[in-house]
Amino acid sequence: MSKWQHLHRISVRPLNIVFAVSCLLAAALPLAATAQGAERIYWANAGGAPAPEISFAQLDGSGGAPLNTLGAPAECCPFGTAIDSAAGRIYWGNEFLPISLALLNGSGGGALNTAGATTSGDSEGVAIDPAAGRVYWSNYGADKISFANLDGSGGGDLDTTGATVDGPQGVAIDPGASRIYWANFGTPAISFANLGGGGGDDLNTAGATLSRPFGVAIDASAATIYWANAEANKISFARLDGSGGRDLDTSGATVVFPVGVAIDPEEGRIYWANYNADRISFARLDGSGGEDIVTAGANPAAPNSPSLMEAPRAAGAPELVGSAAPRSTLSCSQGTWAPDLIASFLYRAPEDIGYEWTRNGAVIAGADQSSFSPGAVGIYRCRVIASDAAGSSSQVSALHAIFRLGAVRRNKRRGTAKLIVQLPGAGTITLAGRGIAAPRAKRRAESSVTRRVGSAGAIALLIRAKGKKARKLSKTGQVSLRARLTYVPTGGLPGTQTKALKLIKRRRSRQR
């Protein structure tokens, strides 16, 4: 008799989909329309038809929908969810079948090749390590922690020597410590093993409830691990340094056979699924209680093992590099984005990256690649748009000015010249160069003069020779110079161009 049969309800879902192991099968069914940009929570439904296997709800209270998983194994009962946000996939375990997956865009699912790894005896509770390219899970009946490679090349079992492995339920990866943690449903304990091998141990949880624990998640910022107590209807935690723990105040929220937890450390919340109440709830990590979330349209049925997803979060603006001259090529980096918090089951890494370019604040039609060649003077900027299943966010580069160096108008009587420069807006323009004269810098080999401009338009910069260049000009009547012009738009980054030019001076005729 399974744990579910003697502890609580169980419903068996008939096998109604033929699938190919290790092959992702696309489907034509569309994903239900959802509000864009809202954060989401996903969970598995272990209940029977017509409940979907995987559902999600928006955390803004606008409800949710089932996810199309057509092509994935479909028998009783999905347990555990974990997301590979960059690949746009969600994975889950099954009570009688291997590891399943579906695309977050709603185009269907498939199964992962787990050859070499244990999948018998209920593969329940999954966690993904994208950096290592692996998915891990707990085998309740076989008392093993196993893994498979995300590339479909099979997997194996983890060495858990020294740690309790008795009806393991739910796993969480701590990449910083290179450990995997799990809850033991049989002999109540929170245990861990080293991902690199060498076995593991149990964690000191003194002061916290351990009663049929199911599902773990880690708040790395607080060095704390949380779990759901399915039998005691409590959410508890322990400190990773082994100094014990306690129970969390969940007043105001439903806690009825909680199964699985997910944490948003930045919002200070922990979420769980109520298996016997068909509700998703949360509590605040500061101990001030919690509440239930709206799941209308998502049809939770014996929900379990939530995972959180939010739109990508900006962490560093993109860099725009390139020449300040027209028709040069500008390149825009992707910028940096906050990583997934895989230990917490919070996912936000971008799945898609898009680009947009503006000139003087207006969007340039058709400019949607990471590079762009501007043909006109102006203030340019690139915008990077990062998207995932929960929505999209964007961040912009610093301003980049394109200015044009025009005609050189020589004064042959004085031996000077005026360089016409077309500027795109307010800022400063600096003229410098070896042998070019500037006020208050006559003794230096190279000097500069900076001029402030208040608006777009053409200006004329006077160029005079000094030192050896001036003497050569007087002696020969001509001299070559190379002017370096640096323009800094207000609020933007400097751009530089150079101009080779010649000064000509008529020499006076000698009187006889």
Image (spheres, rainbow, N blue to C red):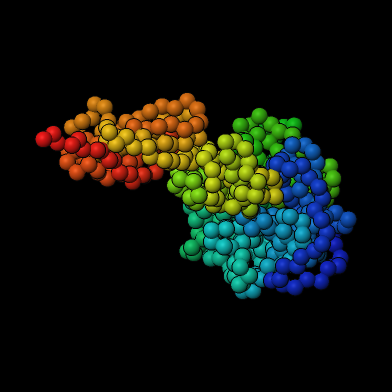
Question: Which residue is at the far right?
Answer: 50
For image coordinates 85% across by 62% down, the residue present is: 13
- Viewer-side residue, 75 vs 26: 26
For image coordinates 72% across by 55% down, the residue present is: 104
281 lies above or below 80: above
Percent position (x, y) of residue 236? Answer: 63, 41
Question: Which residue is at the far front?
Answer: 512
The number of numbered badges drawn on the structure is 0
For image coordinates 53% across by 38% down, the residue present is: 378
Quarter of the figure with residue 49: bottom right
Percent position (x, y) of residue 308? Answer: 67, 46
- Is 237 displayed left or right of 456 in the figure? right
- Viewer-side residue, 76 vs 182: 76
361 lies above or below 83: above
Percent position (x, y) of residue 40? Answer: 71, 44
- Is 54 displayed left or right of 475 in the figure? right
Percent position (x, y) of residue 474? Answer: 19, 38
- Viewer-side residue, 72 vs 138: 72
For image coordinates 73% across by 60% down, the residue present is: 102
Report whether residue 495 is seen.
no
**Image quarter of the C terminus:** top left
